[in-house]
Amino acid sequence: MLGQSSRIMSLYRCGRTAIAIVVALIVGSCEPQEGREWDMSLPWSVQEFHTQNAIRFAQTVFEETGGALKINVHPGAVLGLKGPESMRALEEGLVQMAEMPAFQQVGEEPLLGLESLPFLVEDQEELKALYVFLRPKINRIFEEHGLKIIYIVPWPNQNIYTKIPVHSLADLKGIKIRTYDKNTSELMDRLGLVPVQMPSQDVVPALASGVVDAVMTSTTTGAAQKYWEFLDYIYRTNHLWISNIMAVNLASWNRLEPEVREKIEAIAARLEPQFWAVSRNDDAQKLAVLEAGGITTVVPDPALIKQMRQAARPMWQAFANHVGPEAEEVLRAFLAWKQARGGGP
């Protein structure tokens, strides 16, 4: 995919795709503008809240820099870049900006999988605390790759969707479930399920053909893919967190005038907390959509969650042992903060 640079570098400007046209009309016309022009790649559809956040960011940058920087937002992977490829493509300068899930970049940098350790983080407040310790390290990691992080925004917490009611781990045994990385696959294997790792866009065909009988994902994705057509229950397990990283090629960034860079950093700092609130609100809104479609919401029995936590806990130290001292340092600091808060290890 990355070898198809001629395809990607065309960048679908001004009328190459209907989606790009719509977004371009939102952030500014396709007529030449005074100042620089960048392209931003996202794997999400234009309807996803992460894409809407990106459109808002691009529009705000255009307005508050007086047109010094125009960012063309290209959702739906129309530039040919999928999530796992984004970090490398951005590093190679195929686009100036891209958004990517942190966990999909663990092949490049394993530390980026830390936030997705099962049952490590309870809620957004704890995730914010984790990033106090984690973000300086991933900022440095991105800089070593010639990139700069602009903002980080989490998905809503994760759920398990099933066709059958679940009262104990015995009910889950042998069920084929869609997973999306090493952490989630290992967790499901430990719980007795059969993990089938696949990207989000392959889930609906897999459900329709019986390749999987259960799915783990957010309410955002569940509603977008109309899971009520295949599944009957959503279990609010809240077993892990996933964040998206919006980053820029550092060489492109450094070519901007200092005052423009300062304005962009100020915009990102102002909008990022608002984007986190969008994520939190989207969870509640999409849960209502799922319920309206016929899915039953279930808060799992405490005994079941306890069993899941016990199965997941050894994965934390195994991750630290594999990744090294930086992971150990972040985990130790975060768990100490959590214990001091009264949340326990």
Image (cartoon, grey):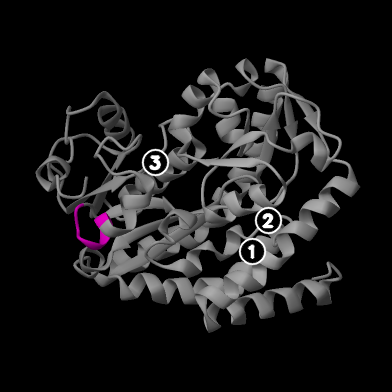
Q: In this view, does 256 lie to the left or right of 46?
A: left
**SS state under label 2:** helix
Amino acid on which the number 3 mark rests in the picture:
Ile
Q: Does 57 lie within the magenta span?
A: no
Above or below, 333 against 63 in this view is: below
Amino acid on which the number 1 mark rests in the picture:
Lys
Q: Indicate the position of residue 85 as horizontal and vertical percent values.
A: 31, 51
Q: Residue at x 32, y 33 (%)?
A: 23
The residue furthest left is 6
Query: If the image is split into quadrants, where does the C terminus sit?
Result: bottom right
**SS state under label 1:** helix
State the CA–CA distance, disc 1 to disc 3: 24 Å
Q: Indicate the position of residue 280 as horizontal and vertical percent values.
A: 65, 44
In the image, the segment drawn in magenta is 89-94
Residue indicated by mark 2: 124
Q: Indicate the position of residue 295 as horizontal and vertical percent values.
A: 72, 21
State the CA–CA distance, disc 3 to disc 2: 23 Å
Residue indicated by mark 3: 55
Q: Can residue 61 be seen in this view?
A: no
Query: If the image is split into quadrants, where does the N terminus sit?
Result: top left
Work out whether residue 319 or residue 136 is closer to the camera in this orientation and state it: 319
Residue indicated by mark 1: 128
**Tags 1 and 2 touching, CB below 8 Å:** yes
Q: In this view, does 188 lie to the left or right of 44?
A: right
- Of the numbered discs 1 and 3, the one sitting upstream in the chain is 3
From the image, state whether disc 1 or disc 3 is nearer to you. Answer: 1
Q: Quadrant of residue 161?
A: top right
Query: Would you call the spot at circle 3 few (<14 residues within 10 Å), some (14-19), or many (20 or more)?
Result: many
From the image, state whether disc 3 or disc 2 is nearer to you. Answer: 2
Query: Would you call the spot at circle 1 few (<14 residues within 10 Å), some (14-19), or many (20 or more)?
Result: some
- Of the numbered discs 3 and 2, the one sitting upstream in the chain is 3
Q: Residue at x 77, y 52 (%)?
A: 308
